[in-house]
Image (spheres, rainbow, N blue to C red):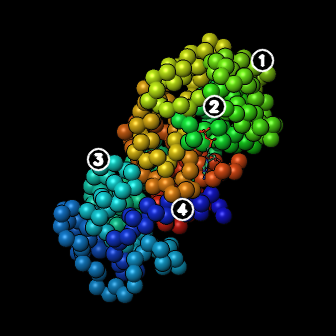
């Protein structure tokens, strides 16, 4: 199964919620979905206020059931063939962890686009993409039809040291291993610093990965100072001429003041060993934690100034909507997504592929 299929499967619950209330329309192409180019709202569309009744089904609609799971053969045309009530859409987005404010914004933007005559699903796809693509230039390029396949380009860290933070259990250590594999595959010489010295076997876990991947790993005794391990790692990277150092850190709960102080210290100490580094601090976030993940991101951002986020477990029962507030409210770029436990299950984040998986549109980037 491709990573895109795994992502689609992971998001199936949210996709189901979003499209549950969808009304199948004619099989007419997008431009014929009701718009006449005059800017007037097409009949039977979701242009009513959220409190208004559901739009009536289009005449000639003989397709049975919803568009969400069946009708696979029509997937290529699906973007043009369904319609949904604004209220239902807003609730579905909130249920998917998008957050009330952004859900309202997505619905308003989709509605506006719909009033121009664009098909409903395309309007929704565009509204979601606008939220999930922080780079305005890329957004513009997408709007004029460029297909930007992010997955084929190597995600370049800003410097030589990437500090990786996140609460216990989100998949931090596994993600560092996957990052090591990814950058090694792309020709970089990688080294790890196993700074999660507080968790029993935390360091050992990364060292085992390192051995398997042929990546040297700097470790320290259990309960030793994580900053000392990070310092050693930074010096070893410089001395050995490695391209990239990933520093694992402890992940006790983000509400614990001490953890944040400790992370700040790790950051300072790396800078002492290798001035200017770490240029990147990436937060690993478990997609299943939903809105709580947003709170985690806020706290870590305040303490150590995050430069990116990696969202794991999108192959599970994740709702997926958390990516919107991460991108929009915190202004943090999502660097990678995790779609499984294996080494190759880390993919560069592509907003378009994510939205396609969410709306079950045909994959362009799979
Ligand atoms: P840490 O405490 O944050 O370092 O978490 P670990 O790296 O030990 O991972 C916790 C669990 O999550 C392990 O069983 C991993 O295999 C699993 N895991 C990590 N990333 C993913 C992912 O993208 N998908 C799935 N399904 N499991 C993941």
Q: Can you give x and y, in whole percent of width and height, for residue 344 in the image? A: 69, 50
Disc 3 or 2, which lies upstream in sequence?
A: 3
Quadrant assignment, res 32: bottom left
Mark 4, Cα crowd under 10 Å, few <14 / some 14-19 / many 20+, is many
Q: Is mark 4 within 8 Å of ligand 1?
A: no
Q: Mark 2 points at which residue?
A: 199
Q: Residue at x 62, y 12 (%)?
A: 272
Along the line of sight, which residue is nearer the eye, 32 or 316? 316
User: Between marks 3 and 4, how big is the CA–CA gap?
Assistant: 25 Å
Give the answer, above or below, for where 192 lies relative to 118: above
Q: Can you give x and y, in whole percent of width and height, for residue 102 in the image? A: 32, 48
Quadrant assignment, res 219: top right
Along the line of sight, which residue is nearer the eye, 183 or 339? 339
User: Between marks 3 and 2, how big is the CA–CA gap?
Assistant: 38 Å
Q: Are marks 2 and 4 in contact (CB under 8 Å)?
A: no
- Ligand 1 located in image quadrant: top right
Q: Mark 1 points at which residue?
A: 239
Please, what secondary structure does the residue beneath circle 1 have? Answer: helix
Disc 1 or 4, which lies upstream in sequence?
A: 4
Q: Are marks 3 and 1 in contact (CB under 8 Å)?
A: no
Q: Name the residue under label 3.
A: 101
Q: Is mark 2 within 8 Å of ligand 1?
A: yes
Q: Can you give x and y, in whole percent of width and height, for residue 107 in the image? A: 29, 57
Checking the image for residue 8, the label placed there is 4
Mark 3, Cα crowd under 10 Å, few <14 / some 14-19 / many 20+, is few
Q: On the rendered structure, is 30 left or right of 176? A: left
User: Between marks 2 and 4, how big is the CA–CA gap?
Assistant: 33 Å
Q: On the rendered structure, is 265 left or right of 89? A: right
């Amino acid at each position: 199964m491709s990573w895109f299929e795994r992502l689609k499967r992971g998001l199936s619950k949210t996709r189901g919620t979003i499209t549950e209330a969808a009304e199948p329309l004619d099989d007419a192409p997008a431009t014929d979905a009701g718009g006449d180019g005059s800017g007037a709202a097409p009949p039977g569309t979701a242009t009513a206020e959220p409190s208004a009744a559901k739009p009536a089904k289009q005449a000639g609609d003989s397709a049975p059931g919803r568009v969400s799971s069946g009708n696979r053969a029509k997937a290529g045309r699906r973007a043009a063939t369904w319609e949904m009530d604004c209220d239902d859409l807003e609730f579905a987005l909130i249920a998917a962890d998008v957050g009330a404010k952004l859900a309202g914004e997505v619905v308003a933007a989709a509605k506006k686009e719909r009033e121009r005559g664009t098909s409903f699903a395309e309007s929704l796809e565009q509204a979601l993409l606008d939220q999930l693509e922080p780079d305005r230039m890329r957004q513009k390029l997408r709007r004029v039809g460029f297909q930007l396949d992010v997955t084929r380009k190597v995600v370049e860290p800003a410097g030589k040291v990437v500090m990786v933070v996140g609460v216990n259990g989100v998949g931090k250590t596994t993600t560092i291993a996957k990052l090591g594999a990814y950058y090694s595959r792309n020709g970089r010489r990688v080294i790890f610093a196993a700074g999660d010295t507080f968790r029993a076997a935390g360091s050992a876990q990364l060292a085992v990965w390192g051995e398997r991947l042929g990546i040297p790993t700097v470790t320290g005794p259990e309960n030793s100072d994580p900053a000392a391990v990070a310092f050693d790692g930074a010096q070893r990277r410089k001395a050995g001429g490695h391209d990239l150092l990933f520093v694992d850190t402890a992940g006790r709960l983000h509400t614990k003041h001490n953890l944040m102080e400790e992370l700040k210290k790790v950051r300072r100490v790396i800078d002492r060993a290798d001035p200017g580094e770490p240029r990147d601090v990436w937060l690993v976030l478990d997609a299943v934690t939903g809105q709580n993940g947003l709170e985690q991101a806020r706290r870590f951002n305040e303490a150590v100034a995050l430069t990116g986020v990696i969202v794991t477990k999108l192959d599970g029962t994740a709702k997926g909507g958390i990516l919107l507030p991460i991108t929009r409210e915190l202004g943090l770029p999502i660097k990678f997504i995790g779609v499984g436990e294996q080494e190759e299950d880390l993919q560069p984040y592509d907003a378009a592929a994510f939205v396609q998986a969410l709306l079950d549109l045909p994959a362009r980037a799979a």
